Image: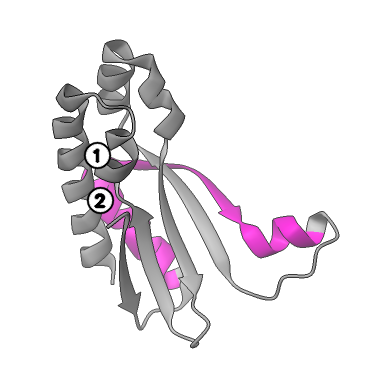
């Protein structure tokens, strides 16, 4: 599977605060937050959905993998999304780092990707 997603009863803003705090507890920070609807409206495209993308990173791990294999930078930073699904429920999810980094064919980094994935999943689970 390429992603991990949970349903939350929290509002989007509360879910973002919760996942940001859970990430911080695990040495990950939010580098940037994209409000997709606002960005699309800014570009003249109507989109009424609520979809936020958080770009997250653990700087020490990022440095480690980039020094080992700069191509891993294609998959950095990791993304956590918070959105309202078509059925009206709010979701928190991520693309699995093992699926993405697996595309690079670097088994040494794949072990690190698994540790990152486990950490991000734990943060998402704590935030829901």
Query: Which residue appears farthest toward the right when viewing the image?
Result: 44
Image quarter hosting the N terminus: bottom left
Q: Position of residue 84 (x, y in %)?
A: 51, 76
Please state which of the two labelled residues, at mark 1 or mark 2, is closer to the viewer.
2
Q: Is residue 11 magenta?
A: no
Assign the magenta stretch its main secondary structure: helix
Q: Is residue 57 above or below residue 19?
A: above
In the rendered image, the residue lying farthest to the top is: 67
Is the residue 121 above or below the residue 78 in the image?
below
* Disc 1: which residue: 27
* Residue 76 position within the rendered picture, expressed as x and y whole percent measured from the top left: 41, 33
Colour scheme used in the picture?
one colour
Q: Secondary structure at mark 2?
A: helix
> In which quadrant of the rendered view does residue 113 lie?
top left
Q: Say left or right for 53 vs 26.
A: right
Q: Quadrant of the C terminus?
A: bottom left
Question: Who's the residue at 34% across and 40% down the image?
Answer: 100
N-terminal-most mark, 1 or 2? 1
Q: Is residue 76 visible?
A: no
Q: Is residue 21 magenta?
A: yes
Toward the viewer: 26 or 7? 7
Which residue is at 72% across, 55% downward?
39
Q: Who's the residue at 45% across and 28% down the image?
A: 74
Near mark 1 (Cα within 10 A), the count class, few <14, some 14-19 or many ≥20, is: few
Nearest to the observer: residue 115 or residue 100: 100
- Assign a secondary structure to mark 1: loop
Q: Which mark is residue 120?
A: 2
Horizontal and vertical percent for residue 118?
A: 16, 49
Disc 1 to disc 2, how far (Cα)? 10 Å
Magenta region, residue range: 14-41
**Residue 85: horizontal and vertical position, in percent?**
49, 78
């Amino acid at each position: 599977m390429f992603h991990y997603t949970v349903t939350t009863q929290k509002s989007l803003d509360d879910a973002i605060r919760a996942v940001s705090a859970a990430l911080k507890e695990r040495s990950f920070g939010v580098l940037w937050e994209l409000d997709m609807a606002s960005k699309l409206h800014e570009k003249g495209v109507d989109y009424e959905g609520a979809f936020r993308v958080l770009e997250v990173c653990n700087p020490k791990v990022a440095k480690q993998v980039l020094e080992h294999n700069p191509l891993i930078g294609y998959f950095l930073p990791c993304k956590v999304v918070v959105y309202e699904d078509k059925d009206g429920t709010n979701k928190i999810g991520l693309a699995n780092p093992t699926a993405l980094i697996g595309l690079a064919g670097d088994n040494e980094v794949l072990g690190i990707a698994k540790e990152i994935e486990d950490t991000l999943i734990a943060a998402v689970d704590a935030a829901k």
